[in-house]
Amino acid sequence: MTSFRTPGARSGRQERFTRTRRWWALAAVSMLQFLIAVDVTVVNIALPSIGADLGAGPQGLTWVVAGYTLVGGGLLLLGGRICDLLGRRRMLLLGAALFGAASLVAGAAPDLPWLLAARFGQGAGEALASPAAMSLIAMLFPAPRERARALGIWGAISSSGLVGGVLLSGVITELLDWRWIFLVNLPVVAVVLVAVPLLVAPDGARRAAGGSGDTAPADASAPVRRRPDVTGAVLLTAGPLALVYGVLRAAEAPWSDPQVFGPLAAGVAALGLFVLVEARSANPLVPLSFFANRTRTVANAATVLLSAALSTSFLLVTLYLQQVLGMSPLQAGLAYVPFCAAILASATVVGRVIGALGLSGAAIAGLLATAAGTAWLSRLPVDGDLWTDAMPGMVLVGVGMGVGLIALQNAALHGVTEDDAGVASGVQRSVDQLGGATGMAVLVGAAVAAGASGDTDAAVEGYRTAFTWATAGVLVATAGVALFARRAGRA
């Protein structure tokens, strides 16, 4: 007797295959996001070796760190908009290829200008790949609980990349050569470039209205390409770059110095012009109406202050471990293992935390944990101990990062559709990176100014000052989220 499968059986098997493929697709884009996060921090411990090899001083090396996040963060909105206009899978693959090519150039850089150009190229690759990945996840996992779980996994892998960068940097710099901190990206990028076309369906043609749909109108035979807001992207990138330059110069010169006041004024002017351009553009990076959604607006504003505290903590704790406690690069990297474990543990349960407390409650819990951690670090002594003086604060900051940042990411995607998922993702990632880099410059500038005498006691006093201001900023963010939640509850 011949046996036939019923349509229902075929449909059920196809549905199971589709669900499985979605999770494999999540794994592929998370691998790329891990590399993107790694390259935020992987240079920190290797900076002395890079400086000795390329003849670079402290100012040039600062831009090796900040240039990547500032260029990436400034162009993320453009990347998010391009994803909506031209397709998420296309932009993910293009961004990954650009990131891999820039990593190759960084690993082979003959001098500092080539390395800086490569770091800017990595940032541009991130600006395409990161919002594409995040918006793909939002579309692949439309159910709120499933999306929270997927974003929790993606965020945990991404966050662990920040710490993994420090550990990898220490191991590679001591055992191999600093150039390999960039060259190790190449095989992973190759895997992503092969896996994504196999796991993610091709992009449909773009709709004429400029949104993004899986299918085009019946008479559309090709993607409709509208000119993206390049002017806005340039202003959004140039503004923070100028502000960071001015803030860092302010640690060495008075505010009235033209090299301080000029860049700061230029940065403020560029950001003001960005708002005007967006208001008048026919195809803005971010329609100002996007911020009418108060949940997204509050989430992104809180992310600025949280990211500033996290970036500052990461940099200053690394300096404290090496320059004050006298740890080697490898020892300093290994000291971050508990911090990484705290991020991973909290990120894996953040979906349940959101289910129990809601998005606002989870965000507040993460913000309070971060504030407790930075408050602990604001007491760092000169003759400190890793496990009693630094580690409790590091672990609390890790918990806050794993819970608070992911909860705010979920809130920043509140109510997204096919037409604005890329914009929402780009805004969130841009706010995260620009807020982190600019806030770090402000807080580190405060630390440098407070420790201007140059000895160890003064340096640690500067660290304490920066952590105190970071704590204040996170508490302001906590109060803002709590106030919004209270008003929303009454509405």
Image: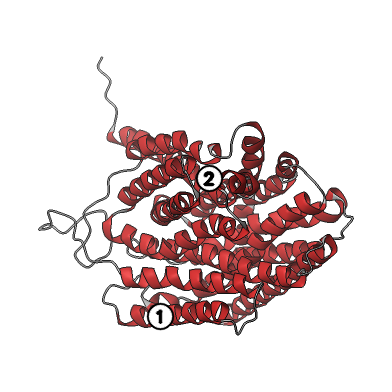
The residue located at (28%, 72%) in the rendering is 283
Q: The residue tagged with tag 2: helix, strand or loop? A: helix
Residue type (three-letter) at the residue carrying disc 1: Val
Residue denoted by label 1: 275
Give the residue displayed 78% in from the left and 45% down from the top.
327
Is residue 267 left or right of 252 when viewed as pictured? left
The residue singled out by tag 2 in the image is 34
Other-residue count near label 2 (Cα within 10 Å), few / some / many at <14 / 14–19 / ≥20: many
Residue pictured at 65% horizontal, 81% vertical: 254
Q: Is residue 356 visible?
A: no
Residue 401 location in percent, x, y? 65, 57
Within the image, what quadrant is residue 105 found in? Answer: top left
Q: Which residue is more in the foreground, 10 or 289? A: 289
Question: Residue 240: horizontal and vertical position, in percent?
Answer: 50, 71
Q: Which mark is residue 304?
A: none
Q: Position of residue 369 (x, y in %)?
A: 73, 62
- Residue at 80% x, 51% y is 391
In the rendered image, the residue lying farthest to the left is: 219
